């Protein structure tokens, strides 16, 4: 069943060179800021004139992205809330953040705001107040961020040799741009494209053409973890642990996901091929064809969640115990029932609705009207 939604996780080759002067973007940004100033003024006048308590404080929820920080400031992005995006709007819990000039094709959260990719491969950052273009050439439309921190990673494919980019959105600068492990020429297929697999504290895991590298963000040095690995061999990393294909070597197929401090012969804890580690590495959320699992990474079994839904799809961890996921009520004709955004607690083994009917399930061959902050694009 996840196949209907999971199969939409395809990366589109749409990277374009940046024009020397993007007049449309400049005009759009200017118009947007003018509208925001007007909106701020109108809202302020309305509050004074009406003397209504409901006006109270103008928050980022009402005027997200205004040029001057609204009273009460922008949201605290260290918090992880149930989040999704539609078009040029990020729904961050109860707060609504408008971005521009591009629409959101994929996005991730950091402790300073959101990084998002546009359809042409440009990469932007919003702090809930302003939007900044921070890169381009993201052919896979894929972004990677840690469970905490302000570093975002992607691959710039506009060069003869693919470049890994690690960018600190809080500092507004690149921490690294490296071709380590890559060579000139287009990979044989999209699955072989280099990827930034995960960012775990001060380590970034880079799936290069020659294997897996670990990049130290502090020293700026790379270490070859293992040569010859497929680009999707390692699934995730958190708290010093690696989630990886339990099939040893570089063979084909998938035998499930194993978790350990290093790549090795540990047994699979789930038969899925994709997963998401909790920040402390204690749990792995994975969703297969017809079911989702929350597995203890120490190998002691699975947490049986009570959700009331036929399927949970995709996940973003809020903390060591809670994660946000998409609830699908029916496996038969799921497009007929709106999707709910759920928050699940591992310790209580239960899920509750955070945002009801937030989106429709895409019909077969349809393009979803929303994006989920996994860093991967939901597309046709």
Image (tube, rainbow, N blue to C red):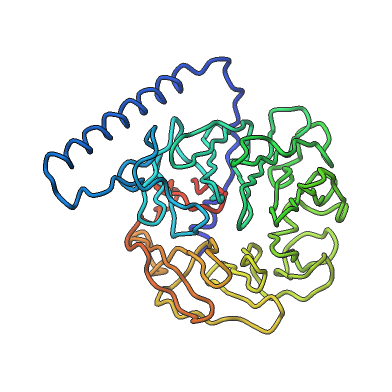
> What's the residue at 43%, 50% (across, down)?
75
Q: Give residue 138's quadrant in the image.
A: top right
Residue 358 percent across, percent down from the top left = 35, 57
Looking at the picture, how far across and down is residue 7, in whole percent? 54, 54
- Residue 334 screen position, x and y as percent: 38, 63
In the rendered structure, the answer to whether residue 252 lies left or right of residue 341 reads right
The residue depicted at 87 percent of the width and 50 percent of the height is: 223
Q: How many labels does the image show?
A: 0
Q: Which residue lies furthest to the bottom in this view?
A: 300
Reply above or below: 326 against 292.
above
Where 109 sits versus 348, above or below?
Answer: above
Q: Quadrant of residue 140?
A: top right
- Residue 268 in the figure: left or right of residue 302: right
Query: Percent x, y for residue 100?
Result: 43, 33
Q: In which quarter of the image is residue 123?
A: top right
- The residue that appears at 32% across and 32% down in the rendered structure is 36
The residue lying toward the viewer, choosing from 365 and 178, is 178
């Amino acid at each position: 069943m996840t196949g209907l939604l999971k199969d939409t996780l395809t990366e589109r080759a749409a990277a374009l060179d940046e024009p020397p002067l993007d007049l449309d973007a400049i005009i759009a940004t200017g118009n947007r800021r003018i509208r925001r100033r007007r909106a701020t003024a109108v809202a302020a006048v309305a509050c004074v004139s009406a003397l209504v308590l409901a006006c109270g404080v103008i928050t980022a929820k009402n005027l997200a992205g205004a040029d001057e920080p609204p009273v009460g400031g922008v949201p605290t992005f260290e918090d992880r809330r149930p989040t999704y995006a539609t078009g040029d709007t990020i729904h961050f819990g109860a707060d609504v953040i408008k971005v521009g000039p591009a629409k959101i094709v994929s996005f991730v959260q950091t402790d300073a705001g959101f990084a998002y990719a546009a359809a042409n491969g440009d990469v932007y950052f919003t702090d809930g107040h302003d939007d900044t273009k921070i890169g381009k050439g993201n052919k896979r439309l894929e972004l990677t961020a840690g469970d905490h921190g302000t570093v975002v990673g992607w691959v710039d494919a506009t060069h003869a040799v693919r470049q890994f980019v690690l960018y600190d959105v809080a500092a507004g600068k690149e921490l690294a741009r490296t071709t380590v492990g890559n060579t000139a020429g287009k990979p044989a297929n999209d699955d072989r494209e280099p990827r930034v697999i995960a960012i775990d504290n001060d380590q970034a895991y880079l799936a290069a053409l020659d294997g897996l590298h670990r990049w130290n963000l502090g020293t700026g040095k790379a270490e070859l973890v293992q040569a010859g690995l497929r680009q999707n061999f390692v699934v995730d990393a958190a708290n010093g642990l690696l989630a990886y294909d339990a099939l040893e070597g570089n063979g084909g197929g998938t035998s499930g996901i194993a978790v350990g401090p290093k790549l090795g012969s540990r047994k699979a804890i789930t038969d899925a091929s994709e997963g998401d580690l909790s920040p402390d590495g204690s749990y792995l959320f994975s969703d297969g064809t017809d079911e989702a699992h929350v597995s203890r990474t120490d190998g002691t079994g699975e947490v049986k969640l009570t959700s009331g839904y036929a399927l949970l799809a995709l996940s973003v961890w809020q903390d060591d115990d809670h994660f946000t996921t998409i609830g699908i009520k029916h496996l038969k004709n799921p497009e007929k029932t709106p999707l709910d955004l759920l928050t699940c607690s591992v310790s209580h083994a239960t899920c509750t609705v955070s945002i009801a009917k937030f989106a429709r399930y895409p019909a077969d061959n349809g393009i979803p009207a929303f994006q989920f902050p996994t860093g991967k694009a939901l597309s046709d």
